[in-house]
Amino acid sequence: MNFTLRIWRQKGANEGGRFVTYEAHDVNPGMSFLEMLDGVNQKLLVNGEEPVAFEHDCREGICGSCSLVIDGIPHGPDHGITTCQLYMRRFPDGATITIEPWRAKAFPIIKDLVVDRSALDRVMRAGGYISVNTGGAVDGNALLIGKDQAETAMDAASCIGCGACVAACKNASAMLFVAAKVSHLALLPQGKPERTGRVGAMIEAMDREGFGSCGNQYECEAVCPKRISVRFIATLNREYLRAGIVESALPSDSESPHAESV
Amino acid sequence: MTKLDSKIPSGPLESKWDRHRFSEKLVSPHNKRKLTVIVVGTGLAGASAASTLGQLGYQVECFCFQDSPRRAHSIAAQGGINAAKNYQDDGDSVGRLFYDTIKGGDFRSREANVYRLAQISGQIIDQCVALGIPFAREYGGQLANRSFGGVQVSRTFYCRGQTGQQLLLGAYSALCWQIERGQVTMRPRTEMLDLIVVDGQARGIVVRDLVTGRISIHTAHVVVLATGGYSNVYYLSTNASGSNVTATYRAWKQGAAFANPCFTQIHPTAIPPSDAYQAKLTLMSESLRNDGRLWVPKMPGDTRAPREISEGERDYFLERRYPRFGNLAPRDIASRAVKAVCDEGRGVGPNGHGVYLDFAGVVEQHGLDVVSERYGNLFEMYHRITGEDAYHAPMRIYPAPHYTMGGLWVDYNLMSTIPGLFVIGEANFADHGANRLGASSLMQGLGDGYFILPYTIGHYLATAKLPPVTEDHTEARKAHHRVLNRMARLLAAKGRRTAASFHRELGSLLWNYCGMSRTKIGLKLALSSIPTLREDFWRDVVVPGTGDCFNQELEYAGRVADYLEFAELLCHDAWHRQESCGAHFREEYQTGDGEPTRDDTRFAHVAAWEYREGASPILHKEPLAFEFVQPTTRSYQ
């Protein structure tokens, strides 16, 4: 198979970028999209040119490193997968494919197709955890958690933090990412003690990082490689509302569960 | 001169760890604040250690080369984590987990280490539950278990096929808390390139900021390496593309002994390689062997479609050779059995590199829905990669390099031969002997990080004399120069071949001569070919661009350069070990029916190698004493 690739090239965060066209010849239909790019880079290297920078690591859809917008869609045309799980047999022979980085204010470009997603880590640090020390935990079976409840928590917890939801959203909102984490912890008894403070702290951090607000377009769900449902955004909204009511009922000097971490 | 002192406490096996913990010195809380710890790597071992050390009050500086600590390769572990909880009441116990692991490792691991791991296994599960990890549950709300390769009890806890992901996200969340509290300083996109040793003690590292290219010195009172395994030396493996040997290899060159590098695990159930462009092999979880049956046609060269081959014409080779364990035989044994039938010309698929993993029986018995619930995501992954539907035709699978039991030598306290350099998780050699059982790596990584290192590191910090060391120290400057020189040498390489082409060539050399089976002649050939390949690399490799910016090819070329040296150490170790044990199969040492022959009189030892500049490495032996179990022929028949 042969393809024409329009790839976004940009030297660094403070420099302008542009599309550059490359030809990919003799592509095997069984190649993954990233292996096809590997091939392009090998040729560039031998010709003394700079290879195209793009991120990848596990190449089996779980680490969340790969992050390409392919023909306008984060992770490409197939549903429920990451770019590294996309295979060239999916494209018609002779197609022109446009490849861009995640585009969002909160994700500055580092080089070519590589962006800085550390904003997501900072949102996590604002409250995406249960504050328990190592040691002294009760027996795992002391907490009974219904199968359905555990499965729903797992649906939310399976987020890989790739940021495709942000890249797909016209507001560059990280609502699905935050919703997944908040829902996962709110659904489990272990997450209850900090439930009220967590949701507000994470939403505040999200705003601080420059992510936009949710416009209920469901683009995020459509591109999520783990098919995380927008129903969790509803859960997040409920949690937020609930926290507001609980907090307003508390004495004003009561400490937020995250007070010590501020 | 390297001295190996395993520091294993004396006395009864059951109370060694308790007594050891009591005899260890403690650091008082107000002193912990003044002590700095460097942790390199943020997988299960690194993240659990860094978070726990931060919580204890130490000042931790933590490094990873990924853009976020959450992306470390532990994330890709699929199957589960073992613990001797005996929730199923099926005869499990600490003793049995200990024995299974010792036997699974073919009597090449330390009794005391393995027993301690089994003892703390239950605590690990409790800790993970407390962190909010959504383990699979039964309808009544209790934790669910499944069985896993190489054992006869159900002791594996799991989160669908994403157990590693959930455990890592749990450890990462604990790390996030400590970063937020200011106890841990996190430095992502930073690669360790050298170790700083001052007066015989590990006191810092030299790193490169992968975005700006800046090379900097970081000093501390103690250094912890949690940098994973080196399966990618084979080029094609199930590891993430970034996983590499650089940190442990550079530490080796500074004096840390490297133990049992030839113990490399080849996992039986990966999707077969298809073509030369392939960049990685994808693992199909071992859990598939709970229900899937492995077979090949009895007749060599039989190219009929699998469903046209009648039951009588099939060879269910694992069930035939190992009737007691059948398709659940441990990984090394299953991989070798696959290789044996393929070598006989009975392999299926392109180049005969594959065997069938068939689910027809379980589909018939339980229906498609049950199979889909258990393995849906794996069948989907298989379909995407191969274009084939495993619900209606058997999968094809073939072994792939997956995990390395070898690693830097550590004593019972997880300290290497360099005082102050601790090594945890897959990066050390400690607990799996010559072969690791399924679902044990997650247990070991978290055991080291949450429950072992935090105790033992305290004793070192409380007892060692640790004068201040700053960035200006001569040894720090020297290490800095070593890194700068190497960078300059790499950047000057403007040849005609890519680093990947050398890596691929090295990988195929190792796979052929130091892979699933090894011979004296093959190893000799590998040992004579590697130096030539290495010279070719330095003469003809091309590294583009400059060092003062984001340059992925420069990072990669540096790692390949280390593989080209490390591969020789691996082959030296395989050459020296004239026996077949666990994952290390020397063709000269086998029985008439192809079973490995272990040699306990000559090789019941850990082989720890010391670096010598410009010469072959020196071998040191740590004898393995078996006081509590009797090494027997490891039979699964």
Image (tube, rainbow, N blue to C red):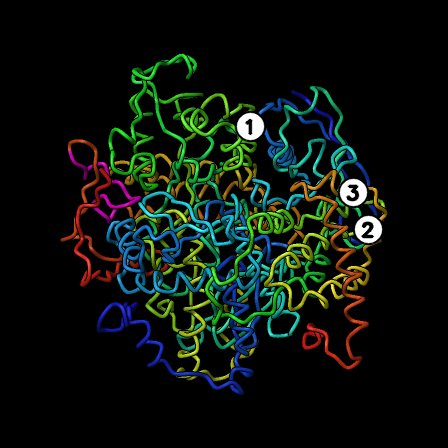
> Quadrant location of residue B98?
bottom left
| Foreground of the two, B225 or A261 | A261
Q: Which mark is residue B383?
A: 1
Q: Which image quadrant: the C terminus of chain A?
A: bottom right
Dominant secondary structure, magenta: loop
Q: Is residue B163 visible?
A: no
Q: Is residue B55 left or right of residue B549?
A: left
* Residue B603 place in picture, x, y as percent: 19, 53
Mark closest to the chain's N terminus, 2 or 3: 2
Which chain does tag 1 point to?
Answer: B
Q: Are marks 1 and 3 on the same chain?
A: no
Q: Is residue B25 visible?
A: yes
Marks 1/2: CA–CA distance: 41 Å
- What secondary structure is marked by label 3? helix
Amino acid under label 1? His
Instruction: Name the residue rendered at 38%, 56% in the picture.
Output: B407
* Residue B492 place in picture, x, y as percent: 58, 49
- What secondary structure is marked by label 2? loop
Q: Are marks 1 and 2 on the same chain?
A: no
| Foreground of the two, B418 or B333 | B333
Marks 1/3: CA–CA distance: 26 Å
Q: Is there a contact, CB below 8 Å, between mark 1 and mark 2?
A: no
Residue lying at the far front in this picture: please name it: B140
Q: What span is in magenta?
A: B575-591
Q: Which residue is mark 2?
A: A15
* Residue B135 place in picture, x, y as percent: 52, 52
Marks 2/3: CA–CA distance: 23 Å
Magenta span contains residue B534: no
* Residue B129 place in picture, x, y as percent: 52, 60
| Foreground of the two, A150 or B303 | A150
